Image (cartoon, rainbow, N blue to C red):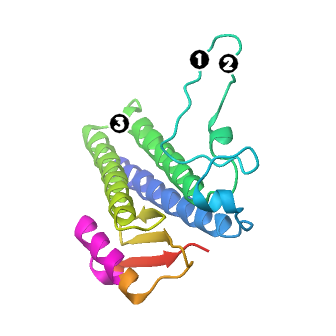
């Protein structure tokens, strides 16, 4: 019985850590400074250092190449790239801890199965978030980031005006409901400042 309690405690702790990381990211990146005009359009310039998620620069180990890391790829004031990176790092940490819990010596099959389920849930969240983001941007919004949890989903959307109309909220809520299966009460839509 104690092995089951330990396993459940690990799974609950991981879920709480992922939610806390997303909430902290949201809180602290919301307090960022005004974007420059180039950053608002998503242009990459030396002045703002912004890169668009999905853009990549191949880095080889040979001489004359610049070494890069994740921090240099996502510098500047791009809230959306920063939020996606932080969300992914939190998920990667949670998956790593779940894998460690499943692979511990003495871990029973039930603990390994529960850890596997936790990993599958996190992978499902990631896929649904990406789908929501793609569909929202396909509707003409500048950018979007979704944070999905056990009880609901939060969607932050960038608009030209910085505000969302009731039509915008209804359109985005409909997308989120179809992709997640949550009802409207579990969906929060916000405009990025």
The answer to whether marks 2 and 3 mark residues whose Cβ atoms lie closer than 8 Å is: no
Q: Which residues are magenta?
A: 170-185
Which labelled disc corresponds to residue 130?
none
Which-is-in-front pick, marks 2 and 3?
2
Query: Which of labels 1 and 3 is toward the front?
Result: 1
Task: Note whether 26 is above or below 128 in the view shown.
Answer: below
In the image, residue 98 lies in the stretch drawn in magenta: no
Q: Nearer the viewer, residue 69 or 107?
A: 69
Q: Is mark 1 in CB contact (under 8 Å) with mark 2?
A: yes
Magenta residues: mostly which secondary structure? helix
Using the image, tell me which numbered label, if any, was put on residue 65.
2
Q: Which residue does the image show at 52% across and 76% down from the upper left? A: 191
Dot placed on the residue nearer the N-terminal end, 1 or 2: 1
Percent position of residue 81, x then y: 56, 53
Mark 1 touches mark 3? (CB < 8 Å): no
Residue 89 on image: x %, y %: 53, 46
The structure residue drawn at horizontal position 74% and vertical position 43%, both measured from the top left corner, is 46
Q: Which mark is residue 107?
A: 3
- Residue 176 shows up from this direction: yes
Mark 1: few, some, or many residues within 10 Å (few <14, many ≥20)?
Answer: few
Depth check, front residue: 166 or 27:
166
72 with respect to 153 (left or right) = right
Give the mark nearest the N terminus, 1 or 3.
1
Residue, disc 1? 60
Q: Counting other residues with Cα less than 10 Å from the Cα at mark 2, is it few (<14), some (14-19), or many (20 or more)? A: few
Q: Residues within 10 Å of mark 3 (few under 14, many from 20)?
A: some
Q: Residue furthest top?
A: 63
Question: In 3D space, how far apart are the residues under numbered discs 2 and 3 (Cα atoms)?
Answer: 45 Å
- In three-dimensional space, the C-alpha distance between marks 1 and 3, rounded to whole angstroms, equals 41 Å
Query: Real-space Cα distance between discs 1 and 2?
Result: 6 Å
What x and y, as percent, mark residue 3? 36, 47
**Outermost residue toward the bottom in this view:** 166
């Amino acid at each position: 019985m104690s092995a089951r309690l330990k396993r459940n405690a690990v799974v609950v702790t991981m879920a709480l850590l992922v939610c806390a990381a997303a909430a902290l990211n949201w809180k602290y990146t919301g307090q960022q400074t005004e974007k420059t005009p180039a950053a608002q359009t998503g242009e990459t310039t030396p002045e703002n250092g912004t890169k668009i998620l999905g853009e990549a620069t191949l880095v080889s180990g040979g001489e004359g190449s610049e070494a890069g890391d994740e921090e240099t790829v996502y510098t500047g004031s791009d809230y959306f790239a920063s939020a996606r990176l932080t969300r992914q790092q939190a998920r990667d940490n949670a998956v790593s801890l779940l894998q460690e819990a499943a692979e511990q010596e003495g871990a029973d099959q039930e603990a390994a199965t529960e850890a596997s389920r936790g990993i599958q849930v996190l992978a499902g969240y990631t896929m649904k978030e990406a789908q929501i983001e793609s569909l929202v941007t396909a509707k003409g919004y500048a950018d979007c980031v979704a944070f999905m949890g056990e009880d609901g989903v939060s969607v932050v959307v960038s608009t030209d005006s910085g505000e969302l109309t009731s039509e915008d909220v209804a359109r985005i809520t409909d997308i989120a409901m179809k992709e997640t299966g949550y009802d409207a009460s579990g969906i929060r839509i916000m405009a990025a400042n």
